[in-house]
Image (cartoon, grey):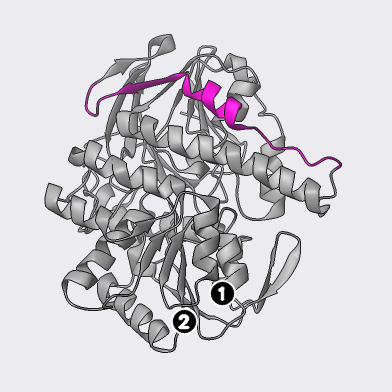
Amino acid sequence: MITLTSLGGAGTVTGSKHLLEHGGRRLLLDCGLFQGQKALREQNWSRLPVAADSLDAVVLSHAHLDHSGYLPKLVKDGFHRRIVCTHATMELSDIILRDSGHLQESDAEFANRHGFSRHRPALPLYGVRDAEKAMSHFAPIAVHQPLELPGGARLTLRRAGHILGAATVEIEWDATKVVFSGDLGRYGDAVMLAPDPVAEADYLIVESTYGDRRHDQADPSQVLGDVIERTTRRGGTVVIPAFAVGRAQSLLYHIWRLKAAGRIGLVPIYLDSPMAINVSELLHTHRADHRLTPQECDATCAVATYTRDVEDSKAITANPMPKVVISASGMATGGRVLHHIKAYGPDPKNTILLSGFQAAGTRGAALLGGAREVKIHGQWVPIRAEVENLPMLSAHADADEILRWLGGFVRPPRRTFIVHGEPQASETLRTRIEGELGWRCTVSQPHEVYEL
């Protein structure tokens, strides 16, 4: 008998960790950080309910921090076996996990220097060396190429769209086929490929990030151009908190399209995120993972001025000229973008442009909800800038697109488990799948053990 337990990514969109157990063997699907609300973030400091060294393998669907970011802590706690994923996911994880370790070390040092943490001293969850140690366990495989895992399980990865290297996961174990969607991408996305169809599964674990919503069908280039033109006409700067992996590259593509069409003129574009710069360079390495031609790829990556150094980042803030600044993180939870929000947020001529899902409890969600001040580095910063959103630029499938992907199954799974969504989104998707497809569905509850 196989059991499924969601140790994260159930009842929330962060901390994705789904445990499969059979005959005393354990496989973990994803190993993400909790983000957003304080009660969730504090869970990162708790050890998993299963010993790290008891896991036989980790299978990683993709590199985003809420799916990969706990790996250095897992290794620190004793995990010593393989982390299996696609080649692009391994390369992205190397960038993301090192950056995460660096940010956590920097944030702890900043908190200690300015004395705004209640911990004495403030400590990082893990550091750069822990991230490097975690990377030594990665074992990449090709999509559609089956791999035998410990305990007799058989793994197959397929493209999920979403970001470079993202995959759906199929585990065949004890004559039972379990499929995990990871994060599904969009159909018709300008940059990324559509998710590969999956024909069948005995049990399905599906994400529900946008399970209760349909994306705006407006042309993102048009909406982005309108915001940039409106802001720069009044002498302002557009600050875009963007996920360094995926969203930043999509934004650069649409800005290139605007420049090519003669819009937004000579407005300077800055990509102020060393991680996003490194990720953008991977577009050239993994051409099979996206739609861009070599020429489009070159033009997209050349449209912005890249700033790696802290001093160059400070110079952007000191420059009063109208401009566009793309900087991580996408939900304004950390990184250089916080300094830009502190600098530009109080002035009504500027715009803060959100460009993706904002998890509950994040600064991005607060801004989207109309907050007139946000706390950054222990200080309350007034927000008088215009706040806009680009929901149509999401890299996540919406409810219709999730149903479209499910429509590729030739027979219903025995049971479908809905994960990775806020409670309303998950419940809405459950109702819709049951009503439209007639499938048996369960919204997974944290730490509840389900027998397959």
Task: Out of 392 and 435, give the one closest to the viewer.
Answer: 392
Q: Residues within 10 Å of mark 2 (few under 14, many from 20)?
A: many
Q: Helix, strand, or loop for circle 2?
A: loop
Q: Are marks 1 and 2 in contact (CB under 8 Å)?
A: yes
Residue interval drawn in magenta: 120-145
Amino acid at dot 2 = Gly
Q: Which residue is painted at 27% across and 75% down in the image?
A: 218
The residue carrying mark 1 is 344
The quadrant where residue 261 appears: bottom left
Amino acid at dot 1 = Tyr
Quadrant where the image shows the C terminus: top left
x, y (%) of residue 313? 51, 58
Q: Can you say whether 124 is above or below 1 in the image?
A: below
x, y (%) of residue 430? 43, 54
In this picture, residue 66 sits left or right of residue 280: right
Of pointers 1 and 2, the one earlier in the residue sequence = 2
Q: CA distance from mark 1 to mark 2?
A: 9 Å
Q: Residue furthest bottom?
A: 234
Task: Out of 105 and 200, give the one closest to the viewer.
Answer: 105
In this picture, residue 279 sits left or right of residue 265: right
Q: Which residue is painted at 54% across and 21% down in the image?
A: 133
The residue carrying mark 2 is 236
Q: Can you say whether 233 is above or below 370 in the image?
A: below
Q: Can you say whether 146 is above or below 121 in the image?
A: above
Q: Helix, strand, or loop for circle 1?
A: helix
Q: Can you say whether 342 is above or below 2 in the image?
A: below
Q: Is residue 139 magenta?
A: yes
